Image: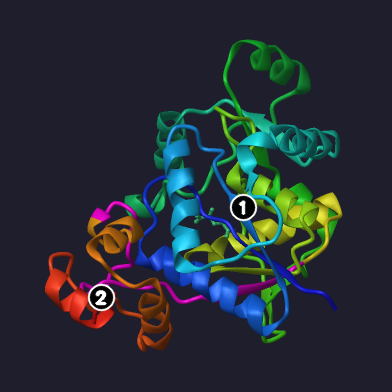
């Protein structure tokens, strides 16, 4: 069996040590399994992604010593493939147009709710647009913006209730989607969930390796693969690197960006080794501990 995996960052900010951990996790797995590693830039969200961040992340990957197969793929250049999948799902009647605003959804949820646990209620779509008649859908689609939602009842009827995904130990996990999630966003007509499964299939990805924060999306991805007749990869979810406060590292924490560490004089080889021996996965430096960071990771020490 020939294995292929990918690192698929979104260029919404400068990469930080947590992203480096994720990239190195993929690269190490690829090395151990004689697998191909692909770099995919997930830049469909034009409100948050910036070409400058995409360029910076490629530079960071080179600095870290990461090698990938072939040219870098940009999701922003693949809208047609994603739209084709939307058409297929629409023809299968697995998705429906949803015209709701957040406010309308919230109001409907509150109206339906008998219990006062309001903070839980914004997540589940109450099905307002689910059963609109086709004429009304067509008419409103001409004048209003709309998202595409997966009809979970139809989807489960089509794929069967035993839908599950497989982890690297061969254990199968039941899907956990129970309401009509958005598959096509109002602004771009498709979504991360759709783009990622289309690309994983198009690029022949056998093993998806990514952070634990995406575990919950995996059931959705399996559902879409199953509906669209796409192959099923194995899923590996690695622990997320946390900061001293126990919170996962985030891009907004610019002080831990790879660019900052590089400019400060951190050695990429030392950083790689350091990240791999962390147990638990906690980055043990505060942002301003420059001296301490350089003592351990500096390219002169
Ligand atoms: N683009 C996603 C992110 O940066 C990763 C998607 C994936 O690995 O499936 O969080």
Q: From the top left corner, tell me how far across and down residue 138 is, in percent.
A: 73, 16
- Residue at 62% across / 79% down in the picture? 29
Residue 107, quarter of the rendered image:
top left
Q: Is residue 50 visible?
A: no
What residue did someone put label 2 on? 298
Please state the quadrant of the image where ligand 1 appears.
Answer: bottom right
Q: What's the distance in space between the residues labelled 1 and 2, CA to CA? A: 30 Å
- Residue at 61% across / 75% down in the picture? 236
Mark 1 or 2, closer to the camera:
2
Above or below residue 4? Residue 139 is: above
Q: Nearer the viewer, residue 173 or 132?
A: 173
For label 1, the crowd category at 10 Å Cα-Cα, with few meaning under 14, some 14 to 19 and many 20 or more, is many
Quick check: 51 left or right of 194?
A: left
Q: From the top left corner, tell me how far across and down residue 58 is, in percent.
A: 50, 52
What residue did someone put label 1 on? 40
Numbered range of the magenta stretch = 233-254
Q: Nearer the viewer, residue 298 or 1?
A: 298
């Amino acid at each position: 069996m020939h294995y292929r995996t990918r690192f698929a960052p979104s260029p919404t900010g400068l990469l930080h040590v947590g992203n480096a951990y994720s990239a190195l996790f993929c690269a190490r797995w690829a090395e151990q399994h004689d697998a191909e590693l692909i770099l995919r830039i997930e830049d469909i969200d034009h409100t948050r992604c910036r070409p400058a961040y995409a360029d910076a992340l490629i530079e960071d990957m080179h600095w870290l010593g990461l090698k990938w197969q072939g040219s870098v793929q940009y999701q922003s250049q693949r809208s047609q493939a994603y739209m084709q999948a939307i058409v297929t799902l629409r023809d299968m009647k697995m998705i429906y147009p949803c015209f709701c605003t957040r406010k309308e959804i919230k109001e409907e949820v509150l109206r339906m709710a008998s219990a006062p646990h309001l903070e839980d209620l914004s997540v589940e779509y109450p099905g307002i647009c689910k059963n609109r008649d086709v004429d009304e859908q067509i008419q409103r689609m001409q004048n209003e913006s709309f998202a595409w939602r997966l009809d979970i009842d139809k989807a489960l009827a089509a794929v069967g209730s035993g839908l599950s995904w497989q982890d690297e130990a061969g254990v199968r996990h039941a899907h956990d989607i129970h309401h009509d999630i958005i598959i096509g966003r109002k602004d771009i007509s498709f979504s991360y969930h759709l783009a990622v499964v289309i690309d994983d299939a198009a690029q022949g990805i056998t093993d998806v390796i990514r952070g634990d924060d995406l575990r919950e999306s995996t059931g959705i991805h399996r559902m879409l693969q199953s509906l669209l007749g796409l192959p099923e990869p194995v899923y590996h979810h690695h622990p997320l690197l946390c900061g001293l406060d126990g919170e996962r590292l985030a891009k907004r924490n610019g002080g831990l960006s790879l660019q900052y560490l590089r400019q400060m004089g951190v050695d990429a080889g030392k950083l790689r080794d350091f990240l791999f021996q962390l147990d638990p996965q906690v980055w043990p430096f505060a942002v301003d501990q420059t001296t301490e960071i350089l003592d351990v990771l500096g390219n002169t020490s």
